[in-house]
Amino acid sequence: MNNSVLVLRQQQIAAAKREYKARGSKLSRCDTCLLAQSLCICDGVNVATNCQSAVCLLMYHNESFKPSNTGRLIADIIPDNHAFRWDRTEPDVGLIKLLNNPLYQPVVVFPAQNVEPERVITEVARKPNKIPLYIFLDGTWREAKKMFRKSPYLDNLPVLSVSPESLSDYKLRVAPHAHQLGTAEVACVVLEQNGEQQAAQRLTQHFIDFRDAYLKGKRQKG
């Protein structure tokens, strides 16, 4: 399994000056899915081998450490995946190279509100010999807005905005809840609307498996 989020997590652990303590840090967890070992979902991962798109997860500071993070699920399913820790002043050299790689067609996934109208698109028109690269800003909503505003290297990229109707429809199909959709859920909608049905279906199932196991673990802990 080529999961760039797990690679980033290990790099951050190696570089950390002190251990990061996530909620439930005393729990015995699977090193891959980060769920309780008794609830591990790794055997159920079904990679979208036909996927013709790539994903890039730009992750706020300690996001890769959090067991509740869903960006990691995207990297489980999409073979061409990349993850970087966000930095306002010193972006990762690998990220800049990826954005400038002529093989890719990068787009930022973000709501249209407060974005220049000329940058906003509602679907990706694939360019010949280019691989769509969907960039997800992975963190809380406040952190995602900060990353969007303070990342000049993203300023010239188109912004793919998912309609509220599409998000509402997804909520109804998966499980209605009041909070804003997580990164993996938004990715499911983006993939489905842009011709990646297999990837969307497999990521949706993976997210449901993860959510159910995560909630079960919280109930057992309670």
Image: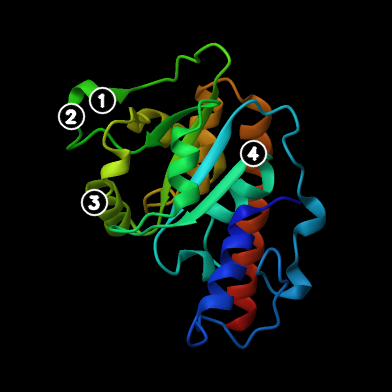
Dot 2: what SS?
loop
**Marking on residue 150:** 3
Q: Relative to 47, is 89 above or below?
A: below
Question: Which numbered disc flags the more N-terminal residue, 1 or 4?
Answer: 4
Left or right relative to 95: residue 80: right
Q: Which residue is mark 1?
A: 119
**Mark 1 near mark 2, Cβ–Cβ under 8 Å?**
yes
Q: Is residue 60 visible?
A: yes
Q: Nearer the viewer, residue 146 or 39?
A: 146
Question: Which numbered disc flags the more N-terminal residue, 1 or 3?
Answer: 1
Residue at left 28%, top 31%?
156
Q: Which residue is mark 2?
A: 116
Residue type at tag 1: Arg
Q: Is residue 171 visible?
A: no
Number of marks drawn: 4
C-alpha distance separating marks 1 and 2: 6 Å
Disc 3 crowd, CA 10 A, few/some/many (<14, 14-19, 20+): some
Q: Which residue is mark 4?
A: 80
Q: Quadrant of the C terminus?
A: bottom right
Residue at left 46%, top 47%?
95
Q: Position of residue 48 (x, y in %)?
A: 72, 35
Dot 4: what SS?
loop
C-alpha distance separating marks 1 and 3: 16 Å
